[in-house]
Amino acid sequence: MDAAHAAITPNPWMVLPFALLLGLIALAPLLFAGWWGRNYPKVALALGAITIGYYLFGLGAGQRVGHTAVEYVSFICLIGSLYVVSGGILVNVKGEATPLENMLFLLFGALIANVLGTTGASMLLIRPWIRMNRYRVTAHHVVFFIFIVSNVGGALTPIGDPPLFLGYLKGIPFWWVAEHCWPMWLVATGTLLAMFLFVDTRNYHRAPKAVREQLAEPVDSWQFQGGINVLFLAVILGAVFINQPAFLREALMLGAAIGSYFLTPKRIHQANDFNFHPVQEVAILFIGIFATMMPALDLLEAQSKGLGSPSLGFFFWGSGILSSVLDNAPTYLCFLKAIFGAYIDADSIAQVQHLVATGGSDIGTFVHGDHAPEIRATWDALTKYHPNLIAAKSASVEDIEVAFLLGNPKFNNFIVAVSCGAVFFGANTYIGNGPNFMVKAIADQNKVHTPDFLSYIGKFTLPIMLPMLLIVWALFFR
């Protein structure tokens, strides 16, 4: 959230529309599924309209609403374009999927998520994942796919997950995350893969061998069709890095989606059971989510400056728990700002600003005080990672704050804690990260059993994700 929005402090009661929407997403499919299926668009739009009306007419915060609208448009253009383009790629698998082959497939998905993003990898691989397990596919296949491919796997590069991309835009170097987060990624991914292998092995042996042989894919059925969509996928991924002029990024994504839709042979769309219902459902629900979560995010940022000197565990669990129910990208930014407020004082920033203005010519005599070593380390980080800012003598306060964290090893882990929290915990609910709901919608469309909102948490998040998160916390952020 930029400086223009930092002063907004909404009435805490305005969190109620967001809480109500989350409650309905969780409970309505269980209690009154028919009514919810017909009316969820009206409910999501109505609750969103209440919050938007409050911000426009109660707070006069039109710029804040506009900022959220732009974020939503960017989000849905990325999600939608990747959905359309991946729907034009047909991957047929070979033979029956054993537990070991499934585990290797998920590992491949985790790795490729750092190249295609968790959204791109999820949309590309979910259909072949369902096909290769079609005779025994069940809830755990869908949920572990969400855990590993749609979330945890993408923790190594800024392309992998939106929070990390925002960190990259704020000045965290591209490969810094991989350099510092790979041990956490390895433990988290390895733990989840081991759990999956155990669960899937039990499931595999429940199916009689004769049934497995009869229903498995033919042994010679490896196929890849729709190769032109690889080019469209490259256009979308390249567009992610375009910030100016406004909406060029989104225009390129939409253009790639339109080109893909009309150039993909109908037989591929039919083989993928492609239609627009899953992306339509996500688009409508997330209008309500993006709108109603504004008060929660603004209250979080308003309170972040009074945290004192919180621990690594606070940033890991705090950013993570809120990323489970809020959009993890703005939550990441709020906690990054909380680190700035907790550990960087105005005098240190002023001294670095002086060094930037003078090109560091008097660093030996000017830098002073208790924080002199940290200021020197901040200057070294600026010159190492952002020499263009030093040459232009134009480093902003935020540039200096990020360099302070990068240059001082004792503060590096605060970035790592927030990064891992935002990415890993996004797997905890269907709404924790954009691809999650898309994967569920595609699975539902393919008549695969998926757990409802509460069952997802009770049967999978708590017994599987929580132990993994406790292990990561105990090893790295305790």
Image (cartoon, grey):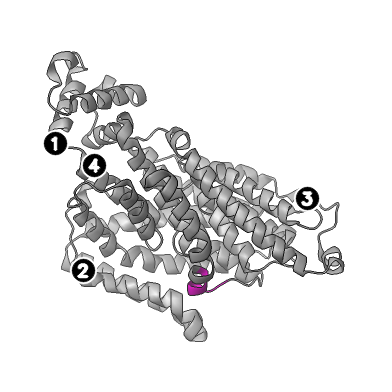
Task: Tell me whether the residue at label 2 lies in contact with that at label 4, contact meaning CB atoms closer than 8 angstroms.
Answer: no
Q: Which residues are magenta?
A: 451-456
Query: Which numbered disc covers residue 223?
Result: 3
Quarter occupied by residue 167: top left
Mark 1: secondary structure: helix
Frontmost of labels 2 and 3 is 2
Quarter occupied by residue 136: bottom right
What is the spatial separation of the Cα atoms under label 1 and label 3, in whole angstroms? 60 Å
Q: Is residue 365 above or below residue 51?
A: above
Query: Which numbered disc covers residue 340?
Result: 4
What is the spatial separation of the Cα atoms under label 2 and label 1, in whole angstroms? 30 Å
**How crowded is the residue under tag 3: few (<14 C-alpha within 10 Å), some, or many (20+)?**
few
Q: Which residue is mark 2?
A: 12
Q: Is residue 435 visible?
A: yes
What is the spatial separation of the Cα atoms under label 2 and label 3, in whole angstroms? 54 Å
Q: Is residue 235 left or right of residue 99?
A: left
